[in-house]
Image (cartoon, rainbow, N blue to C red):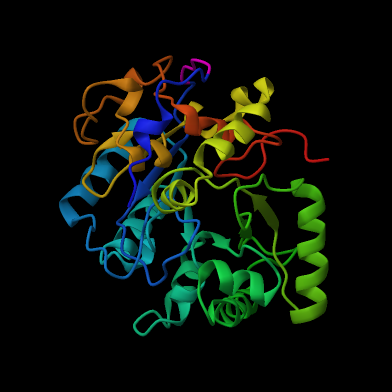
Amino acid sequence: MHACLPLLHPSDFPAMARYGLETVQVNLGYRCNQSCLHCHVNAGPSRTESMERDTVDQVLDFLRRSGAAVLDLTGGAPEMNPHFRYLVEAARGMGLKVIDRCNLTILEEPGYEDLADFLAAQGVEVVASLPCYLEDNVDRQRGNGVFEASLRALHKLNALGYGAEESERILNLVYNPQGAVLPPPQAELEEAYRRELRARYGIVFNRLYALANMPIQRFGSMLISRGGFHAYLDRLRAAHRAENLERVMCRSLVSVDWQGLVYDCDFNQMLGLPLGGGDTAPAVGALNPYSLKNAPIAAAAHCYGCTAGNGSGCGGALGRTK
């Protein structure tokens, strides 16, 4: 695996400061039942990092102290952490909105047969990765058989009311490009997804998020191996839109890793860039949430991945979509 951070410094990315804290994103570990080419976490079945119960309790204490409204769970496959359900139930009991960033195929793994029912019962919003509505494209990016397994999982979620217009059970899909290109306009792509998935497979969903691939970890290493790293960075930088700076996720989000260390975003976590550009990442149990407002945000050249073109973040495109 090639190191990407040395190629991302120095950077001319504009300086930014935080707003108030709204979302606490928690990476519960890097273990995953898939190994996707575009993965910025380098997650996979052989990874063993997993958040322990004591750290989960520290996260819950921080949530109580912070006043944040949203708990955003990611991985790896976050559901593979043994304390996933405990954390979800506790957060929902506190009245927080909980998001599960689900790869869909986990719903078919042995031992997770009742996971969809659990998510529905808890009112968890599902954000599911589906990089295309065509089988060949999905399997090329995520592995053979992933598309068919994803369809079965989507049907299972639809049967529970996820994605239906009148339902409160939210199902949003995530698109990533196949390579070192920017995603197309989100609104047009969402219309195509909605039309094709309904016509071909009878599947419905609420929103589609179009996200750019980040030049870090597995995807960044692949670009380095193929000699395309700097060309992709140049593409992102050339497509930068200053107006997207006002809506990037790090303005109102912090990212907690499996050890309980806090970063400005999940991408910075993967690069080891400490919160605010400090020397070390603070522990969630010791962090004062009210010290975050107006604090600086650590940035490097990869940040252009969030502000290029229509922009992209955890909630999809930031700017104009047409």
Question: Which residue is farthest left?
Answer: 54
Residue 246's place in the image compared with 118, above or below, is: above
Image spot of residue 306 (x, y percent)? 57, 35
57, 271: nearer the viewer: 271
Image spot of residue 84 (x, y percent)? 32, 62
Q: How many marks?
A: 0
- The quadrant in which residue 163 appears is bottom right
Q: Quadrant of the C terminus?
A: top right
- The quadrant in which residue 297 appears is top left
Which residue does the image show at 37% across and 21% down from the upper left?
292
- The quadrant in which residue 174 appears is bottom right
**Residue 120 part of the magenta segment:** no
Residue 208's place in the image compared with 231, above or below, is: below
Q: Main secondary structure of the magenta part?
A: loop
Image spot of residue 38 (x, y percent)? 50, 56
Q: Is residue 49 left or right of residue 9?
A: left
Image spot of residue 276 (x, y percent)? 35, 22
Magenta segment: 14-18
- Residue 264 appearing in the image: no
Q: Is residue 102 left or right of residue 75?
A: right
- Residue 101 appearing in the image: yes
**Residue 16 part of the magenta segment:** yes
Q: Is residue 236 left or right of residue 289?
A: right
